[in-house]
Amino acid sequence: MGAGVLSDLWVPEERGQSLAVYTLVPLLGPAVGAIGGGYIIQHIYWRYIFVYGSIFTASTLLFGIFILQETFGPILLRRKRLSLHGATTSAKETSYGFKKFIKVDLVRPFLLLVTQLITQALAVYLAYLFSLNFFTILTFSTCGLSSMAKVASVLR
């Protein structure tokens, strides 16, 4: 979805720099995350990490819902059409839009995963790559191993 949003926000001549940053950030995540995670584990109690993460996630969600504007063209055109036709059709259109969202948009990824062989192959391949990345970070991080043992002993 990120590349689609970036293509909505920038003209083709300006997309290169934004796509470069968008591509670079996930690659920096494992490196910076391991260093930052080691520092956080040494200085903050593990339950507070969950609380701080939940607060950050909730504040980011609220920011996105109330501050960020819609950029998708068909949604903007539908809103404009509804505002021109008046409020009588907007209630009907809104309920239909929500029902359509539930029936189509939330079911579509699962249908693609179940019915398309290429989607299944990519999902298995990406799961394999993610597990390799995770185990590599966990293996070479002595702090990560000791913290995982601490968490496991607390959860037991």
Image (cartoon, helix red, strand yellow):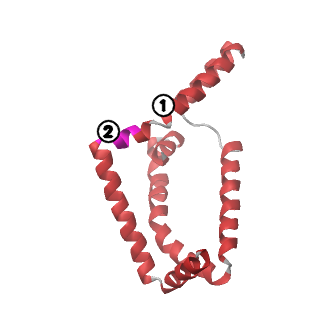
Badge 1 crowding class, 10 Å Cα cut-off, few under 14, some 14 to 19, many 20 or more, is: few
Q: CA distance from mark 2 to mark 1?
A: 15 Å
- Residue 50 placement (x, y as % from top left): 65, 67
Disc 2: which residue = 115
Residue at the (47%, 70%) spot, across then down:
30
Disc 1: which residue = 104
The amino acid marked with disc number 1 is Val
Residue at the front extreme of this rendering: 156
The C terminus lies in quadrant: bottom right
Left or right position of 13 against 53:
left
The amino acid marked with disc number 2 is Thr
Magenta-colored stretch includes residue 113: yes
Badge 2 crowding class, 10 Å Cα cut-off, few under 14, some 14 to 19, many 20 or more, is: few
Is there any visible trace of residue 15 in the rendered image? yes
The dot on residue 122 is none
Q: Earlier in the sequence, mark 2 or mark 1?
A: 1
Residue at the (65%, 64%) spot, across then down:
53
Whether 129 is drawn above or below 140: the answer is above
- Residue 154 placement (x, y as % from top left): 61, 78
* Magenta segment: 111-116
Magenta-colored stretch includes residue 21: no
